[in-house]
Image: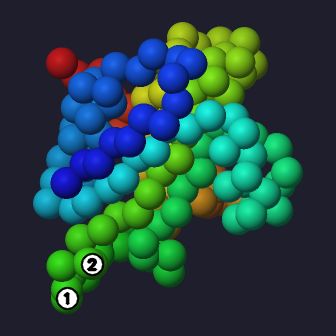
Amino acid sequence: MILIQNNQTTVPIDLKKLKSDTQKILKALELSRFDISIILTDNSTMQTYNRDYRQQDKPTDILSFPYHPELKPGTKILVHTPEDRNLGDLILAPQYILDDLPKWEQNFETRLEVLLVHGICHLLGYDHIIDSDYEIMKFEESRLLAVLRVE
């Protein structure tokens, strides 16, 4: 199940497209039967999450909270209980994303797709701390973004 909770009112979000994009990504990953939560929040709340969980006292565009934090990239999730079908939570700050657009030279919809893919990759164990991990994650992100471009 895909649960989307919009707790902000400043930036209009196409929730149907966000859900559809999430479904396409999960299908491409063969995780259609898995659960994910997406929370859209304001910059202030995002700053609180970022401070409390990453010790960064500032807002950011997206945070990922994986249910399977020890998962290695490309590894299949073993399902032993219904809870194991949980991928985790994504928190996005639409106002931050909008304000940050000039840095990325993308429109809002494209940036949201990129961040959705990026966040889901983090839920699946991908990371970009060192260059070799970044290359692996970038490859998977490109593959998933291509899935969204096929209509």
- Residue at 32% across / 56% down in the picture? 36
Label 2, secondary structure: give it: helix
Mark 1, other Cα within 10 Å: few <14 / some 14–19 / many ≥20? few
Q: Given the image, on which type of amino acid does mark 1 rest?
A: His
- Residue 31 disc label: none
- Residue at 41% across / 46% down in the picture? 38
In 3D space, how far apart are the residues under numbered discs 2 and 1 (Cα atoms)?
A: 6 Å
Q: Is residue 118 left or right of residue 85?
A: right
Mark 2, other Cα within 10 Å: few <14 / some 14–19 / many ≥20? some
Image coordinates for residue 48, horizontal then vertical, percent: 73, 52
Image coordinates for residue 144, horizontal then vertical, percent: 35, 39
Q: Is residue 9 left or right of residue 148?
A: right
The residue wearing badge 1 is: 80
- Residue at 31% across / 27% down in the picture? 15
Question: 73 or 52, which lies in front?
Answer: 52
Q: Which residue is farthest bottom?
A: 80
Q: Given the image, on which type of amino acid does mark 2 rest?
A: Asp
- Whether 89 is drawn above or below 24: the answer is below
- Whether 114 is drawn above or below 100: the answer is below
The residue wearing badge 2 is: 84
Image coordinates for residue 102, horizontal then vertical, percent: 72, 12
Residue 98 appearing in the image = yes
Question: 84 or 13, which lies in front?
Answer: 13
- Whether 11 is drawn above or below 77: the answer is above
Q: Quadrant of residue 14?
A: top left
Q: Is residue 54 left or right of residue 33?
A: right
In the picture, which quadrant includes the C terminus? top left
Question: 51 or 110, which lies in front?
Answer: 51
Q: Is residue 48 left or right of residue 5?
A: right
Do callouts 2 and 1 mark residues in contact (Cβ within 8 Å)?
yes
